[in-house]
Amino acid sequence: MSKINSVMRIKPGDKVLTIAASGTHAISHLLADPQQVIALDLFPPQIYISKLQATAMKLLSRDEFSKFIGINRKAINPTERVKIYQDIRMALEPNTKEFWDKSLQDIKEGIFYCGEFNKLVATLSDELLPKVHNKAMIERYLALGDNMKEQVHFHDAIWDTEQWRIAYKSMRDLMIGPMRDLIEEIDITTACLHQYNRVIRNVPNNKNEFLEPLLTGDISGKYLMPLYLREGNYEYIKERLDRITWIEADIAEYIDSVDENESRKDCQMFDSINFSTVIPYMTKEPGKIKNMIKSAANICKPGSKLVYYTLGEFSVLYPDELIDSGVIRYDGQDNTYGIPFIPIVSTVIQNMANKTPTDKYHTLNQEKWPSFH
């Protein structure tokens, strides 16, 4: 997430709009010291897990919180996580408390791993990968990264077997499932495998926070921890959690409502927006994407960054009409981020509502985003 904060150019005092997901987006954005983070999600369980994480961070030490969400979970009795939950549950809002009171099995397993997405990812570590590589091989692979040539050679010569490729694509196929009809018609599982291979060539395994939970179903603490759990970062975030507002809403509808409400817009101009993976799921609705990006530009200051995540094989979905007319500038993509997706970046050039371009951002050829490989 430090990469995303940098890509979004978040600065102290900024106002940020983001998809909440499990809460980690919004929480990690606080490391860049924005004044306000509006975190939206259309799905109530995502808001409930976000609020649980934020409340737990306020009340627990870093070690307690790590134990609670499931770090090194296979070495800790699940009842300890339930006990921690019982200690903090009265601090939750009623709807959030009611949801988690009925979801104690997810508490036992560790909320870092709950949700349909993570449960499907677990099919790789729990069922598919053990048939391909043993534990010793997995540990050796995770420890690579000090020498990237060695890492790439090991991957190509030893790890990347036909059985591995089948297992990885099978897991991704399960994850895509019912969303397949909403996205671009490409060979998605192959695109996912290509993205994995790009990351292995660009990011050291031992510094890739996404790799260990993907391959083992756990975070042992031996390798790079998620950004918000690292020592120093946790305490820094903890002091700023009140800056996040959690809202259950569709991001397109929210952006449109702010754009249409002049008094609301005046006091809520954003400095960056993180759409997460929302835009690729709107591929077959180009008109909706265009309207959302146009409204997003209207509620952002010139120079603001708009970011979404996708796969390298997907078309760039920032509308050509808005690029050609100078509303936004397409900045490129970053192939060195994580495993699942690539951040696709654009800059707001002109606020169409107020017609307020700035010289710094008005010329499309100025301040080009660097090329990523």
Image (cartoon, rainbow, N blue to C red):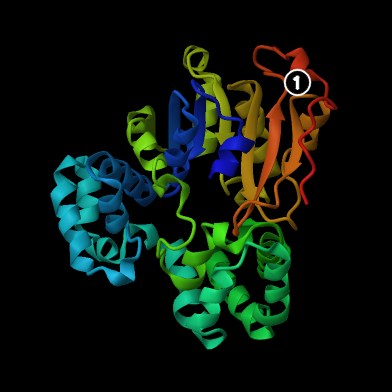
- Mark 1 is surrounded, within 10 Å at the Cα level, by few (under 14), some (14 to 19) or many (20 or more) other residues, namely many
Classify 329 as above or below 71. Answer: above
Give the residue type that dot 1 points to.
Answer: Tyr
Task: Determine whether, in the image, residue 172 is placed left or right of residue 79.
Answer: right
- In the picture, residue 93 is in which quadrant? top left
The residue sitting at the right extreme is: 365
* Percent of width and height locating residue 56: 26, 45
Q: Which residue is found at the position 51% from the left and 71% from the top? A: 215
The residue at which mark 1 appears reads as: 361
* Percent of width and height locating residue 250: 48, 40
Q: Which residue is found at the position 47% from the left and 43% from the top? A: 25
Task: Determine whether, in the image, residue 87 is placed left or right of residue 5.
Answer: left
- In the picture, residue 141 is in which quadrant? bottom right
Task: Determine whether, in the image, residue 324 is placed left or right of residue 17.
Answer: right
Between 154 and 274, the one lying in front of the other is 154
Residue 318 can be seen, yes or no? yes
| Element class at badge 1 | helix
Residue 275 can be seen, yes or no? no
* Percent of width and height locating residue 261: 50, 17
Q: Which residue is found at the position 63% from the left and 37% from the top? A: 7
